[in-house]
Amino acid sequence: MNGATMGDDTPLRQAKAFAIHTTLVEHFGAPTFTPGDDPVDELIATILSANTNDANSGRAFAQLQEAFGGDWEAVRTAPLDAIKAAIRPAGMYNQKAPAIVATLERLKADWGGYDLRELAQMPVAEARAYLTSLPGVGFKTASIVLLFCFNQAAFPVDTHIQRISQRTGVSPRRANPDKIMRIWESLLPPTVFYPLHINLIRHGRQICQAQTPRCDLCPLQALCDYARRAGEWRNG
Ligand code: SF4
């Protein structure tokens, strides 16, 4: 943990962040890490997931695998139109198809193929720097690969985690996902990143929903700035 950049309220924020983690474990249980997809699969799937839902990006990924037999070399050398046709359900296929090819070109040039398991041996900062140097790969995608493929010390922030971080006050109310990622990473030890990430998403889907947060049912109520402000407003 490195709280040096967080200012004087760092100990309070750390206590709140840790209390959120332990409360969610009590409520939802403690998810244990199981190695996820191959890192190259995860990278391509994440490129496909931009600005669409899981169902559409999942369908596009499955169609891409089926069209090219799961062979990334075949995708890299395929006509762009064939890739666009396969990934059509993900939307933005005019941007996503060239991004996929450009990523595969880099992997081929850098590693001689499509095996990124060596990233697991690198320090996190180095692995993240490499991944974000790939075309179209931002901090979020890099963190997803590092956390879900290798259980490394990275904390990806999706829309649920962004919303809960802002509402609870772990992050400032207008913080962007990259800033929120760095806040969580600075406040908590890497051992909790995986279970906390999973539990925050569960919490966002089931309780702290975007339009109508179910604060009356929420185990985080006592830790939440949004709930406190709502109570103050109700009490005049
Ligand atoms: S108290 Fe309400 S706003 Fe705060 S985390 Fe819970 S559901 Fe979300």
Image (cartoon, grey):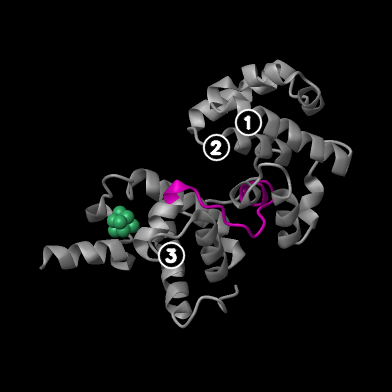
Q: Which of disc 2 and disc 3 is earlier in sequence?
A: 2
Left or right of 106? Residue 166 is: left
| Residue 9, position as x, y percentages in the image | 44, 80
Q: Earlier in the sequence, mark 3 or mark 1?
A: 1
Q: Residue furthest bottom?
A: 8
Screen quadrant of the C terminus: bottom left
Q: Which residue is mark 1?
A: 96
Q: For the residues labelled 2 and 1, say whether their Cβ atoms are less than 8 Å apart.
A: yes
Callout 1 secondary element? helix
What is the residue that sits farthest to the left in this orientation?
Answer: 236
- Tell whether position 228 is magenta: no
Magenta stretch? Answer: 143-160
Q: What x and y, as percent, mark residue 188?
A: 54, 68
Query: Mark 3 to mark 1: distance in Å?
Result: 31 Å
Amino acid at the residue labelled 3: Ser
Identify residue type, mark 1: Lys
At 65% from the left edge and 53% from the top edge, which residue is drawn?
151
Measure the C-alpha gap from mark 3 to mark 2: 23 Å
Amino acid type shown at disc 2? Ala
- Residue at 78% over, 27% down: 76
**Crowd tier of the residue under label 3, counting other residues whose Cα lies within 10 Å: few below 14, some 14–19, many 20 or above:** many
Q: Which residue is mark 3?
A: 171
**Label 3 beta carbon within 8 A of ligand 1:** no
Q: Which residue in the structure is indicated by mark 2?
A: 50
Q: Is residue 148 magenta?
A: yes
Figure disc tally: 3
Q: Is residue 216 left or right of residue 89?
A: left
